[in-house]
Image (cartoon, rainbow, N blue to C red):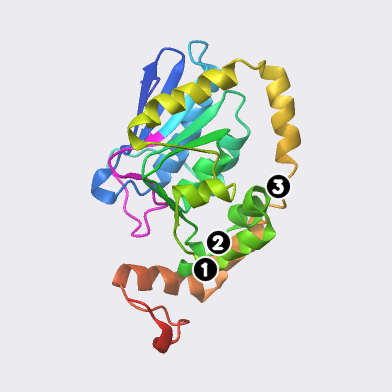
């Protein structure tokens, strides 16, 4: 039970000192349930607390890394969450602040919450087949983590472009603009992720954590209060979600420019 992450869509496996967390919910294209988000936090805590583990690699299955949260609100019968967990389910800052190295091995489609997992990892190694996107505004969601993190990774002009257009990027462009750091041929992804872990583990943990703390100061304000207000009070997120589920034009998009 020690390696049970409490989410049917996650698998945790051990390979020597490396813990592998597989995002594995193929019937929903690896979309995160709340329990999966919280399960990622559990995985990070596990590698930080278990003396037999030294690092975590997060990867997906099939042609999908992770597309973000399940907009249909679907969950799995086996999912388990602590009572009253609220917004504390989100794993992004836990991944960013992990003492043990966290590497994302992005095998395919990576967007929304999946992209935040990749960005908050110490190193993101991507397959040359991977694609990336920041689609939150398409659903009417002003995402606080992206608003703070994207400018630190890619600069203000590119962050505006990615957030406001929600356009799709291939792996080569994502690496070129600094969204991710490494791209490898698809068949080499697993070994490249392990190699990144090996390289990080050659550095001492205390100095590494101090360096990470200084790097993390480059991020802007994570304004979750504004984001929560929009989710609670604005009609746009509800309209965006409904339009996505109903496969129709959101009310704010002029009909003459709607791309089906």
Q: Main secondary structure of the magenta part?
A: loop
Tell me whether circle 1 and circle 2 mark residues in contact (CB < 8 Å): yes
Which label number is shown at residue 162?
2
**Disc 3 or disc 2, which is closer to the eye?**
2
Residue sitting at the far left: 27
Residue 65 is inside the magenta segment: yes
Residue 110 is inside the magenta segment: no
Quarter-of-image position of residue 37? top left
Horizontally, is 226 left or right of 86 in the view?
right
The crowding category of the residue bearing disc 3, from other C-alpha atoms within 10 Å (few below 14, some 14 to 19, many at least 20), is some
The residue that mark 3 highlights is 219
- Residue range highlighted in magenta: 59-76
**Disc 3 or disc 1, which is closer to the eye?**
1
Image vertical order of residue 81 relative to residue 240, above or below:
above
The residue that mark 1 highlights is 165
Write the residue at 37% across / 79% down. Answer: 249
């Amino acid at each position: 039970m020690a390696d049970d992450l409490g989410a049917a869509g996650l698998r945790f496996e051990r390979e020597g000192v490396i813990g592998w967390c597989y995002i594995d919910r193929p019937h929903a294209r690896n979309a995160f349930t709340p329990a999966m988000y919280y399960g990622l936090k559990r995985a990070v805590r596990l590698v930080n607390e278990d003396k037999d583990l030294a690092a975590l690699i997060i990867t997906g299955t099939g042609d999908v890394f992770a597309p973000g949260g399940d907009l249909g609100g679907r969950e799995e019968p086996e999912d388990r969450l602590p009572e009253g967990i609220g917004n504390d389910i989100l794993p992004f800052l836990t991944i960013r602040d992990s003492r043990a190295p966290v590497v994302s091995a992005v095998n395919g489609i990576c967007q929304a919450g999946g992209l935040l997992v990749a960005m908050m990892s110490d190193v993101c190694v991507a397959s040359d087949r991977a694609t990336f996107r920041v689609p939150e505004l398409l659903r009417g969601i002003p995402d606080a983590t992206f608003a703070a993190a994207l400018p630190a990774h890619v600069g203000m002009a590119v962050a505006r472009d990615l957030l406001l257009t929600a356009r799709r990027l291939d792996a080569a462009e994502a690496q070129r603009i600094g969204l991710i750091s490494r791209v490898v041929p698809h068949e080499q992804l697993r070994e490249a992720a392990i190699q990144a872990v090996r390289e990080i583990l050659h550095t001492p943990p205390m100095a590494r954590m101090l360096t990470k703390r200084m790097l993390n100061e480059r991020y802007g304000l994570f304004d979750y209060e504004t984001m929560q207000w929009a989710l609670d009070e604005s009609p746009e997120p509800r309209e965006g979600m409904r339009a996505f589920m109903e496969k129709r034009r959101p009310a704010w998009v002029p009909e003459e420019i709607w791309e089906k």
